[in-house]
Amino acid sequence: MSRRPQDLSQYHGHHVVSGTELRTQFEEEPDSSERASRTWRRIRHGIAITLLVGLVVAGAATAWAVISGRLTLPQPASQPTVATCPAGKYDYLPPAKVTVNVLNATGRDGLANQIGGELKKRAFAVKNVGNERLAVGATAVVRGGFAGEAAAFTLQRNVPGSIYVRDGRADASVDLILGPAFKALADPKLVDQTPGPILCTVPTATPGAGG
């Protein structure tokens, strides 16, 4: 008679604990702090992935808007430049209609206040007085925008040897920047008030002129 295979999980009616079951009983469940750490890492990974996807989508949308012309990127503000000299002739304005800021680039203390006072006596509307640096080699610079071209012409007639420099301002005010070679304003009795052009280069003496 053949013998039945012996059931190794039973011994004299008692259950025999296997090695696998024994290891299971002794394995520790992760404590609450470790579970919380794992959960937080998963949350952080999810947030990072969400942000990355959002940045990619936003970048693609911006690029498409620029390419399609729906979005225009702002351009850097233009700096004052010595532009092409305005053409044509200008009428001499009543000085009271010319608003001027007097700026001293000579290094001589008090010169801007002095010249500002002299311009006020000629009825110019002197607004601000201060200091400035001058990078152009000229006796003085008259600086202003398109709207102030006639004012610049009028002021130039009072400042011999001055040159005009255009900037981006929108109003009709002008700046008078006094350079190191500046000496004095023109004699008010000798100021030429006839129409004429704006000067953007230092005038040169005409051969044979003078006495």
Image (cartoon, rainbow, N blue to C red):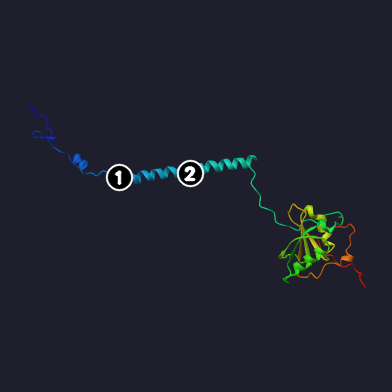
Quickly name the residue at label 1. 32
Across and down, in percent, residue 167 comes to 74, 56
Residue drawn 31% across and 47% down?
A: 33
- Number of numbered discs on residues: 2
Real-space Cα separation, disc 2 to disc 1, in angstroms? 29 Å
Query: Which residue is most to the bottom?
Result: 211
Placement of the C terminus among the 4 image quadrants: bottom right
Residue mark closest to the camera, 2 vs 1: 1
Classify mark 1: residues with Cα within 10 Å, few (<14), some (14-19) or many (20+): few
Residue drawn 55% across and 43% down?
A: 59
User: Please, is residue 51 above or below residue 15 in the view?
Assistant: below
**Secondary structure of residue under mark 2:** helix
Quickly name the residue at label 2. 51
Mark drawn on residue 3: none
What kind of residue is marked 2? Leu
Residue drawn 82% across and 57% down?
A: 96
Q: Nearer the viewer, residue 42 or 188?
A: 188
Q: Nearer the viewer, residue 142 or 69?
A: 142
Q: Is residue 202 left or right of residue 20?
A: right
**Secondary structure of residue under mark 1:** helix
> Which quadrant holds residue 69?
top right
Classify mark 2: residues with Cα within 10 Å, few (<14), some (14-19) or many (20+): few
Q: Is residue 80 left or right of residue 56?
A: right
Across and down, in percent, residue 67 comes to 63, 41
